[in-house]
Amino acid sequence: MIQMNHVFMTYPNQVSALSDITLEISPGEFVFIAGPNGSGKTTLLRILFGAERPSRGEVVVNGMKITERRFNRVHSLRRTMGIVFQDVKLLRDRSVSENIFFALEVTGHSRTEARRKTWEVLSRVGLQERGRDSVLNLSFGEQQRVAIARALINDPPLLLADEPTGNLDAQVTTEVMEIFTSLHKKGTTVLFATRDMDLIQRYPHRVVYLSEGKTVDVGKGIER
Ligand SMILES: Nc1ncnc2c1ncn2[C@@H]1O[C@H](COP(=O)(O)OP(=O)(O)O)[C@@H](O)[C@H]1O
Ligand SMILES: [Mg+2]
């Protein structure tokens, strides 16, 4: 599903964010991208999302060679993935269902289809009862679940999450993790960036550990 071969990323200010990353992720895997602040997690996800072009190396996502010089299918690429960020970025003056509905409309769904799909994705994150509430009345964890629902609207086979539990307390983190776990159980491939090593230790998933832009320890699960 994802192949990165000798990927380097140096930003225009000469900061080297990724240095010789080689990584393969199979369909259906749940992989933690771990590492401290500044280790390159966000850069790695942004490359997979087509938001940054690496300075060197080859990246293939869902069969698309996105590092090809003439690659121009960023929209097709993004339709195959959902992305969840730490800072939720919802339309704050709108209801929960409107947030999902608008995202469906801009990706070309008919109004009837968008209405049906809105309730479907909200029920997948356990928020079907909250559709009419204003986003302002939700807890931060519930807002994060709306963001996850929004990432699911195109039924993406791949979900990228950039520190989605970074601002949440332990209880809410567990709730959000349960949603990612259930999506993974249904077959979604999940890439989950976090610097929370305690969180990682609670799950049996593969860990790719980044330090200063290099993978220092690529393990399968955690010994315990
Ligand atoms: N747009 C940018 N321009 C220049 N340097 C950047 C940019 N984005 C990130 N960096 C630098 O790249 C390195 C990796 O950052 P990042 O990928 O955000 O790491 P993480 O998500 O693990 O905190 C850091 O040194 C950071 O300062
Ligand atoms: Mg980051």
Image: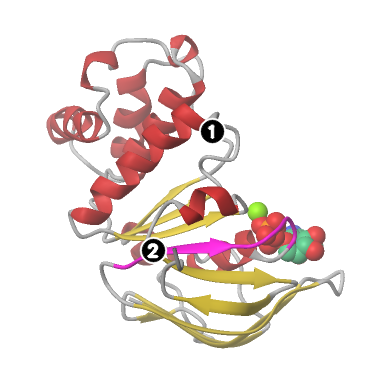
Residue 203 painted magenta: no
Residue placed farthest to the right in the image?
Answer: 13
How many marks are shown on the rendered structure? 2
Say if 209 sits above or below 192 in the image: below
Mark 1 element type: loop
Mark 2 element type: loop
Q: Does the residue labelled 1 lie within 8 Å of ligand 2?
A: no
* Quadrant location of the C terminus in the rendered image: bottom left
Residue assigned mark 1: 89
Report which quarter residue 60 is drawn in: bottom left
Residue assigned mark 2: 205
Residue 36: x percent and y percent?
70, 58
Say if 69 sits above or below 173 in the image: below
Q: Which amino acid does label 2 sit on?
A: His
Instruction: Using the image as rendered, state which of residue 200 and residue 10 is in the foreground.
Output: 200
Q: State whether residue 183 appears in this view.
A: yes
Gap between marks 1 and 2, in whole Å? 28 Å
- Kindly report which numbered mark, 1 or 2, lies closer to the viewer in this rendering: 2
Instruction: Using the image as rendered, state which of residue 214 and residue 51 is in the foreground.
Output: 214
Residue range highlighted in magenta? 29-38
Residue placed farthest to the front in the image?
Answer: 224
Left or right, 3 with respect to 212, comes to left
Residue drawn at the location 71% of the way across and 65% of the way down: 39
